[in-house]
Image (tube, helix red, strand yellow):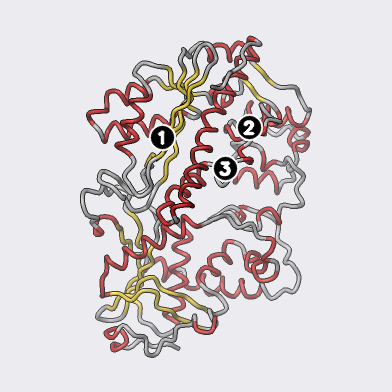
Amino acid sequence: MVKITENWYNDKVPKNVHNLWVNGMRGEISKSKYCKGIQCPKILWMDANKPELAVINDKTSAFENGKLVGELARKYFGAECIAEASFVFDGLFCSVDMLRKTETGYDVIEVKSSSKVSDVYIEDVSYQYYVLVNSGVPIDHIYLMHINTSYVRHGELDLQDLFVMEDYTEKAINKQSEVAENIRMIREYNMSDEVPEKDISKCCEKPYKCAYYDYCRRHLTRPSIFDVRNIKMDDKYQLYHEGIITFEDIVKNKIKLSDQQMMQVETTYYHKPDHIDKEKIKQFIDTLSYPIYHLDFETYQSPIPEYDGMSPYKQIPFQYSIHIEYEDGKLEHKEYLAEAGTDPRRELAERLVRDIPENVCVLAYNMSFEKRVIEELAKQYDDLSEHLLNISENIHDLMIPFKKKYYYTEAMQGSYSIKFVLPALFPDDPELDYHNLEGIHQGDEASAAFANMTRLPVDEVERVRTNLLKYCGLDTYAMVKVLEKLREVTTGEVDIENV
């Protein structure tokens, strides 16, 4: 049993609480292990016995965001709180983000870089309450502190407005018997020497996609019910547990799906030829006019608004690529990439209105994103607003023919994302293969690379900038080639000359 004395708090030095990180001892179950265990206890067994089978996503950005938010939270409280106080009870370990002395005990404050409270956060603080109270620490309140997305920065950060504190004491208290039962279940489950039997279920997805997702699905024949697009995940698992697993099961049991979903299933199951609605594709192409400005943005976001007029997690555009396609088939390429560590918005907006004249045809893939970026810039800069909004009003969406299934092939796997459409249309073209790029292959990698650049040495910065330019440039060049293919299937024309 651990007791925290008044002297310990005043001196900011734990006298009766030992830091359990010493000698690598963390306790049998930490709060992160507890949260994993209630998602699925098999995760902990796999972590302990077969960790080499885990597929770990890069969580560098999330870690950096959490670190940044944690540092600001400490400034928010100043000297009135102790950060990362550690406790153990009966082999259970937890480290408390913020521990604040009150007249009758302590407040626990769990700091999150997210914009809202999720169910797993409540499980987290309930576990902390269990460990601390059973260690003999008197807890008055337990709070979850998170980011306020309605905050707008003007000048210096206002930490009082940036953070929201919510009281979850009652919920934590009400879950104490459940916490005790969960701990018992986790321990019992993980006593096995063999891989515990557990079928896949919704717990594989929530609150986080499990690192052993692929391992636990190795029995599935691809494609399966989980590969059908736009079915709610709950419905997929219900069908799976009813024995509807393969595309054959779907067809033979006459499972009711949407027309587009059935197109995916039947095209694959029967190996149907490509579905091409030439008339609809031609109608789409006829809405475009030369010259066509193929446009793509890259953005990043931060929980802490870095510049005036920004809110937490607002998209900050830092890069664009434009391929200008003329009627004779020639291409012109323009691009912009901001300097890391500076507010990129004004310069990017100025360059954009210089590179795209008013009243021209602009083409994007999933135009809602590009329109949103441009309209946010227009709100920020009154003198550029009219031109920016004109660009936005003239954007067309290259995704439409694929989203509406005017053009669909088995290789698209039910998706209309350009990352599926492009290799389906050009399966043997290494120039159009994102996997052949160095370092950056998708949007989230581009965002993380730019956000991290200020921490890199100069020579590394140049390499990352080169990779970013190649990635974003491929996005718009890919659009040119996709449009070429659409024209080709309706008229048999065109051979784009890249100059």
Of labels 1 and 2, earlier in sequence is 1
Residue plotted at (58% across, 14% down):
280
Q: Position of residue 353 (x, y in %)?
A: 33, 26
The residue carrying pointer 2 sits among few (fewer than 14), some (14 to 19) or many (20 or more) residues within 10 Å by Cα, namely: few
Residue 95 seen in render: yes
- Mark 1 or mark 3, whichever is nearer to me: 1
410 with respect to 459 (left or right): right
Residue plotted at (66% across, 26% down):
425
Whether 166 is drawn above or below 108: the answer is above
219 with respect to 166 (left or right): right
Q: Quadrant of the C terminus?
A: top right
Q: Amino acid at mark 3?
A: His
**SS of the residue at dot 1?**
strand
Whether 345 is drawn above or below 132: the answer is above
Whether 115 is drawn above or below 167: the answer is above
Q: Which residue is mark 2?
A: 431
- Mark 3 or mark 2, whichever is nearer to me: 2
Whether 261 is drawn above or below 499: the answer is below
Q: Position of residue 61 (x, y in %)?
A: 46, 55
Q: Amino acid at mark 2?
A: Glu
Q: Which residue is mark 3?
A: 441
Q: Which mark is residue 316?
A: none
Q: Position of residue 398 (x, y in %)?
A: 52, 23
Q: Quadrant of the N terminus?
A: bottom left
